[in-house]
Image (cartoon, grey):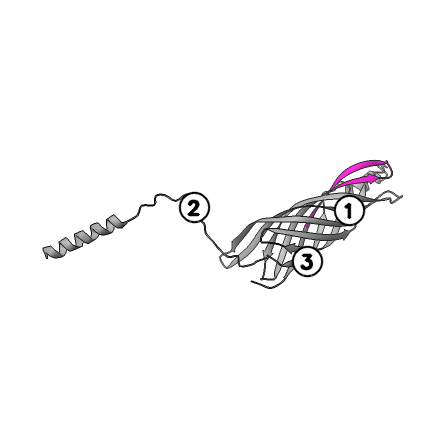
Amino acid sequence: MLTLFATLALAADGVGKDTLDIGVLKNAEVKVVQKQLFQKEDKLEIGAALGVMPFDGYTIAPQLALAGAQHFSETAAIELRVGGGYGLPNAVYTELEGPTYGVAVEAYRYLASVEADFQYTPIYAKMNLGGKRVLHHDVYVLVGGGVTLEQSLLPEANTAIAPTVPIGIGTRLFTSKKAMVRLELRDSMLLEYRAQSQTWGFKQNVALSAGLSMLLGDTK
């Protein structure tokens, strides 16, 4: 019995000596590799969206947009977006041009736009919906350039083709490996020449939109 205890003690001592103390790992040294369930890399995304521009001082404009984006990776894509709509006078404009004030405001309505933008997607995440479903989504930001066609609300109805710089933020809510719902806030900043006053004016067309997109290409 004494021989058995001596043997176990020596074995335990030997194991303790073989243990390697690696210290404390830093957060930067710990990496978790997780494959995304829904992937965009090397795929073409096509879609359509309905939106509205509700923040202009004198108009409100519904918009229909068609878009196509080439995803070079899970984080980088280039998109071409074509939009069309019609800016309607809002309550403020109607009141100003009415009999009470009789003011003719040199306001321009949105008609159409063509924009190309670069999209960067730094976030891919999952949300738990009521403990019954996990919703995969991403978050992206965009910046680009393009042109916008607008028309004066005054009787002359002059048109302006304005250089445009869009910036924005959005999210894709994945419903399958090929389909998604897309929500976006886009601010298209215009510099347009206004014929009636013969001046240049800065304008922001801020649009809220929701749409459906499809991913074309082989699923890895």
How many other residues sit within 10 Å of disc 2, few (<14), some (14-19) or many (≥20)? few
Residue hosting label 3:
47
Residue 140 percent across, percent down from the top left: 61, 49
Asked if residue 214 is positioned above or below residue 195 in the image, the reply reads below
Looking at the rendered structure, the number of numbered marks drawn on it comes to: 3
Pick the residue in front: 20 or 127: 20
Which numbered marker is on residue 194? none
Residue 149 percent across, percent down from the top left: 80, 47
Q: Residue lying furthest right in this view?
A: 156
State yes or no: discs 3 and 1 in contact (Cβ < 8 Å). no
Helix, strand or loop for disc 1: strand
Q: Earlier in the sequence, mark 2 or mark 3?
A: 2
Q: Amino acid at mark 2?
A: Glu
Q: Amino acid at mark 1?
A: Thr
Residue 47 percent across, percent down from the top left: 68, 58
Which numbered marker is on residue 29? 2
How many other residues sit within 10 Å of disc 1, few (<14), some (14-19) or many (≥20)? many
Pick the residue in front: 144 or 194: 144
Most common SS among magenta residues: strand
First to last magenta residue range = 190-208
The residue that appears at 11% across and 56% down in the rendered structure is: 3
Tell me how far mark 3 sits from mark 1, CA to CA: 20 Å
Asked if residue 1 is positioned above or below residue 60 in the image, the reply reads below
Instruction: Kindly indicate the quadrant of the structure image that contains residue 41.
Output: bottom right
Residue hosting label 1:
148
